[in-house]
Amino acid sequence: MNVKLVIFDLDGTLMNTSPGIFATANKAVQAVGHAPEHDINQLSKFIGPPIIDCFINTYNLDKDLIPKAIEYYRAEYAKSGQYNAEEYPKMKDTLAQLKQKGYLLAVGTLKHESLAKSMMDHFGFSSFFDSIRGADLESKLTKSDIVNKVLEDLSVLPSESVLIGDTVHDLNGALGSKVSFIAVDYGFGFPKGQQKTKDMMAVISQADELLTLL
């Protein structure tokens, strides 16, 4: 496979963003009169899907309350939650080496695009990436739509691209866009020790394994 472009999911792939996401989500549901959630397994459902589905899957929140919860969540996350995160080990070194090898690098995330760009700036990732694409305000874009925007930005064919991600939503996005997929088992979706399936190019447990795969 002649890979030219490597696209990274953000939450659970580039960075462990769970502390900020979980705290902000609980504040948001409390703001609309709903009880917070403290079960980590249940809270983990908040990472991966579009934000509307996050509030349904995690809190079973009434659909009438979701717009207000999303508004509160986005305001609070932009103010403080986005900074409560940390990069995964060896991530920047891996990105630097991939860049040195001549790969195009991008971010494709279901996090709102302005927040994704803000976080990449704040945590010192932006210089590695040739495109950073995320969700729209209405959460109408699918993961495939976002991956396709990256492909369009960089004029790269799906057959020359691979998406790195930690959830089945990432896998489905890759399949929908006809790009290859590498799973990570250190994030929030796939369990530790996840076995490679027919739809996966590989499964990795740490970032620098990409250097021998690509």
Image (cartoon, rainbow, N blue to C red):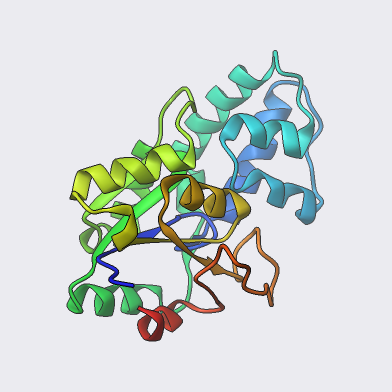
Please tell me which residue is depicted at 47% across the width and 22% down the height of the picture. 138
Please name whichever residue, 106 or 125, is drawn nearer the observer in this view of the structure.
106
Q: Quadrant of residue 7?
A: bottom left
Which residue extends farthest bottom?
A: 212
Please tell me which residue is depicted at 63% across the width and 68% down the height of the picture. 197
Q: Quadrant of the C terminus?
A: bottom left
Where in the figure is residue 209, as x and y percent of width and height? Answer: 45, 83
Q: Quadrant of the N terminus?
A: bottom left
Which residue extends farthest top?
A: 64
Where in the figure is residue 101, as x and y percent of width and height? Answer: 20, 79
Query: Taking the image as drawn, is residue 125 in sight?
Result: no
How many numbered circles does the render carry?
0
Q: Is 162 left or right of 104, judged from the image as shown?
A: right
Where in the figure is residue 16, as x and y percent of width and height? Answer: 54, 62
Where in the figure is residue 83, as x and y percent of width and height? Answer: 45, 52
Please name whichever residue, 150 or 13, is drawn nearer the observer in this view of the structure.
150
Please tell me which residue is depicted at 57% across the width and 61% down the height of the picture. 166
In the displayed structure, 154 sits above or below 5; it is above
In the displayed structure, 113 sits above or below 3; it is above
